[in-house]
Each structure stands twice: as C-alpha cells, then as structure tokens.
C-alpha cells in the first residue's frame, strides 16, 4: 500500500496596525480609494470572497489579533465566517484549523523574555475568547525564532509552530525526500521539546509570487505537484500570506478554491490542516534551528534592528528608533513596578492576565480585585492606567514600524503614537513626564524620506491625535 501524501496550505492573514491608538480607528487612506482605507479594500478583495467561497475551511490559517479586532467591529459577518471555518473543522475532523497569533506583531527574538511571555500569553487568551477552545499551534510574527521564543511558547502550552527551510540548521537528511514538512522536534534548553513544521520553499514561493502566471490550479498541480509526488514526504506544507489570494494577486481566491477543493486531491494530495496532521503524526526526529532568523530578512533579524539591504536607502534610523522605544519601555516598566510591587502582586503576572480587561471579560476594578488587590478608587484607577500604558508600550514594538525604508510612514507613526499614548497614561498615573526623554531619543532618529526626524514626527502625531488634550 502506498502511504498517503498530504498537502497543507497555511495562510497568514495580517494587516499592519495603523491609525489612532486612542480610538482604534484606522481612518482614511486616500491611496486605498475607492475604499476608505486599505483594511476595507483588502476585505473586499480578499477576506470576504475567500470567506464566502468557503476557502477558509480548507486551509490552516491564522488571523492576526489586530486584524480580527478590526474585522469584528467593521465586518462582523466576515469575522463570523472565520470562526465558523474553525468550528466546522472541529466538528468534522476533531481538530480545528485556526492557529493562534501573538497579540501584536512583535519580532519575539528581539524582545525581553517577559515581553515574549506577555505577547504569547495575550495571543493565547485572545484565541480562546474568540474561538472558544485552546489553540494547538502558534504563528510567530515573520516566523522570527530563537530558542527562548520556542521555550516560551512551549511553557504556555503550545504544541507547534511553523518555520521556513532556511531556518533549519541541521536535521534528518533523506536524499529521496524533497522538502518534507515534518513535524520535527526541537530540543529546548530546559530539557523540554517543541514541534516545528517546515514549509516547502518552492511551492510556497510559486504561490506567493507567481500565482497569477501559473495557469490556474489544475495546470499547477499537473506541472508542479504530480511529478514531484514520488519524492514527497507524508506532508508538503505551503505557507504564505493570506492576502496572496485576491489582494496581492487579483481574483486568485479562485485558484485557492480550485486547488483546495478539487485539484490537490485529484493530483494525489488530499488536503489536511496542521492540527489534524499533528494529531495523527507526532514528530519522530529532531532538528536544530538557526537562531535569530525569520522568513522575510536574509540578514537574520537586521531588518528590524539595525537596517539592511532588504530595504532601499539608509536604514540606520531603525536602530535609533529601537533605542528610543527601549529607553521608554524601561522607564515605563520602572514606574509600573514601583507602583505595583509594594501592593504585593507580581507585576508581570498581573500584566499577562490583563487581556481579560482588554476583551471586556471583566471590568478593570474587578480584575484588580480578582488578583487580590484591595484598593481605593483612586489607586485602582492609577494601576489601571499603568496597565493600559503597558499595553500600548507593547503595541509600539509592532514589527511593521521597522519593516519599510521610511520612518515617516503610517506604521512607524503608529508606533510613535502608541509610545506617546503610553507616556501620557504613565504621566497621568504617576505625575512623571517621560516625553522629554523620548523626544531627545527621537531627535537623533533620521529617517523620514522628507528629511524629518523622529522628534518632529512625534510632535506632529501628538498634535494630530489630540493626545495633549486628553484628560490628564
Ligand atoms: Zn535583511
């Protein structure tokens, strides 16, 4: 009997967070016309048609948290179809097809351990609130990984994540098998282990970059999938941005529909999902990872830390911006710890549980009482302000701020806006004003294509969003 060989297609759905951190509104983006902004346009081009065609239920997918928050508010019917796709898989196969995301799109290997933990704990809690079940797997932003990140996801109960081939340093080599997806074990420093799926580079790249020229799903499966079947392992995994299907490539939700419903199976590759495959095929062998790597920078993590050739022009503003954010985060943390520790609670555990308040599962004062804090109204309000400041200090590390070539773009502006809001809340809670420190650090951040520096962008953002006029 010939062993079955499966195809899994994982889609990562994401939009960079932008707009106003105080109201949560994306606002108007003229370049997205005739739509109000790019979220609206990409919903029409991609999220909605894929949901309505039933494509989501055949994929393994993750929708980033900030995108789900927006969809829930703006397009509740599309949001419901995302949840239903997972529910259908749970009911039909005993394993859902949704994979969790971190809360914000943070490059985790660049984050401190406690920040890694908060991002993963918040992402896990958000997944449970939305999908009503614990997640098995998690998507790491930009697939950026190191052993500490993998340890944190294992500690918080995740069973697997996904990496690209170039992130695997060594492991089982079978000359007869081309690009097997595993899953494989990765040994962790504490003696534990975590599973990783490895994506098929050729399949993934053909879909991500050339889907419009592949001649349709039937032609592609005949040319690319069928001849390769004898060299395939039990699972071949393509992993791409979900926006590939309809936004990056217009109308290609039809490719996805035909591929996943008919053509893959007709070519000898029944489709599966990561959690379903994992349930029946636990890892057998170990691999080692290349630490501090990602799927979208060829220089390790330089794209988000020092700048590199992945973006044109001088990109050393990225390091200067990171220094400004790090200094601010450090000062906000000091204020927060100084306020909360004398009350007898672990500040970081209190922060990790704060997602219940963000999701309105419990009111702020109720959350503090549940954590064992008996506080007068004024002290409770100050602690809640500092928790909210912690939240926005997490948002400011969203990777998109560092992804592009120009500091004066909506994504870095959004990071700076979140920093401004966090320091406003910290000032209201403690009376300590960190804006002087932050503006000084931003003044040496030169990277606006128009010659502007970070301090000028900060001043403009504070004015535009009316942060100075918020109740102090
Ligand atoms: Zn790079």
Image (cartoon, rainbow, N blue to C red):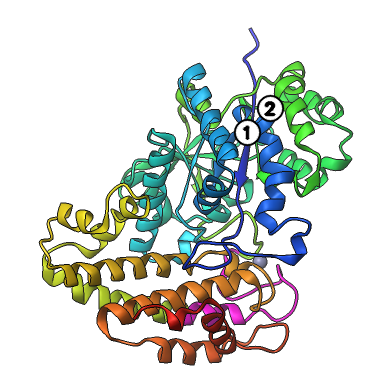
Q: Which residue is mark 2?
A: 232
User: Which one is in front, 306 or 240?
Assistant: 240
Separation (CA) of disc 1 from disc 2: 7 Å
Q: Secondary structure at mark 2?
A: loop
Can the viewer see residue 298?
Answer: yes
User: Which one is in front, 414 or 191?
Assistant: 414
Q: Earlier in the sequence, mark 1 or mark 2?
A: 1
The crowd level at tag 2 (other Cα within 10 Å; few <14, some 14-19, many 20+) is many
Residue range of the region highlighted in magenta in the rendering: 300-324
Name the quadrant where ligand 1 sits. bottom right
Q: Residue shown at 38%/33% (left/top)? A: 133
Q: Which residue is mark 1?
A: 180
Q: Secondary structure at mark 1?
A: loop
User: Which one is in front, 286 or 118?
Assistant: 118
Q: Position of residue 181 (x, y in %)?
A: 59, 34
Q: Residue shown at 52%/45% (left/top)? A: 72
Quarter of the image with the C terminus in it = bottom left
């Amino acid at each position: 009997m010939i062993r079955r060989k499966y195809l899994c297609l994982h889609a990562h759905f994401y939009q960079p967070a932008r707009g106003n951190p105080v109201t949560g509104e994306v606002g108007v983006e003229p370049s997205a016309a005739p739509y109000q902004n790019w979220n609206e346009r990409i919903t029409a081009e991609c999220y909605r048609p894929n949901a309505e065609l039933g494509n989501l239920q055949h994929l393994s997918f993750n929708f980033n948290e900030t995108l789900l928050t927006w969809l829930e508010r703006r397009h509740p019917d599309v949001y419901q179809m995302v949840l239903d796709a997972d529910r259908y898989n749970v009911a039909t196969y005993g394993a859902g097809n949704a994979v969790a995301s971190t809360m914000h799109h943070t490059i985790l290997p660049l984050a401190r351990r406690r920040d890694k933990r908060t991002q993963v704990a918040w992402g896990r809690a958000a997944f449970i609130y939305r999908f009503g079940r614990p997640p098995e797997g998690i998507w790491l932003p930009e697939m950026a990984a190191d052993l500490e990140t993998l340890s944190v996801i294992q500690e918080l109960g995740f069973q697997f994540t996904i990496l690209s081939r170039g992130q695997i340093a060594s492991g089982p080599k079978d000359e007869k098998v081309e690009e097997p997806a595993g899953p494989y074990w990765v040994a962790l420093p504490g003696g534990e282990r975590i599973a990783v799926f490895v994506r098929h580079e050729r399949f993934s790249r053909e879909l991500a970059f050339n889907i419009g020229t592949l001649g349709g799903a039937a032609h592609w499966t005949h040319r690319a999938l069928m001849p390769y079947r004898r060299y395939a392992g039990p699972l071949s995994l393509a992993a791409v941005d979900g926006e590939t299907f309809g936004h990056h490539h217009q109308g290609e939700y039809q490719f996805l529909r035909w591929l996943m419903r008919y053509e893959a199976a007709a070519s000898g590759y029944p489709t599966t999902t990561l959690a379903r495959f994992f349930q029946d095929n636990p890892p057998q062998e170990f691999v080692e990872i290349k630490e501090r790597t990602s799927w979208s920078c060829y220089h390790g993590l330089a794209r988000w830390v020092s700048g590199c050739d992945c973006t044109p022009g001088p990109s050393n503003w990225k390091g200067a911006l990171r220094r400004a954010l790090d200094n601010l985060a450090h000062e906000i943390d000091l204020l927060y710890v100084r306020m909360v520790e004398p009350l007898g609670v672990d500040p970081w555990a209190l922060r990790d549980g704060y997602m219940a308040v963000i999701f309105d599962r419990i009111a702020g004062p109720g959350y503090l009482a549940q954590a064992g804090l008996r506080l007068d109204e004024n002290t409770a309000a100050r602690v809640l302000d500092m928790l909210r400041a912690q939240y926005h200090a997490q948002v400011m590390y969203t990777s998109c701020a560092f992804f592009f070539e120009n500091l004066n773009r909506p994504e870095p502006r959004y990071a700076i806006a979140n920093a401004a809001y966090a320091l406003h809340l910290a000032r209201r809670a403690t009376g300590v004003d960190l804006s002087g420190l932050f503006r000084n650090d931003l003044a040496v951040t030169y990277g606006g294509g128009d010659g502007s520096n970070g301090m000028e962008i900060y001043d403009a953002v504070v004015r535009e969003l009316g942060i100075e006029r918020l109740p102090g």
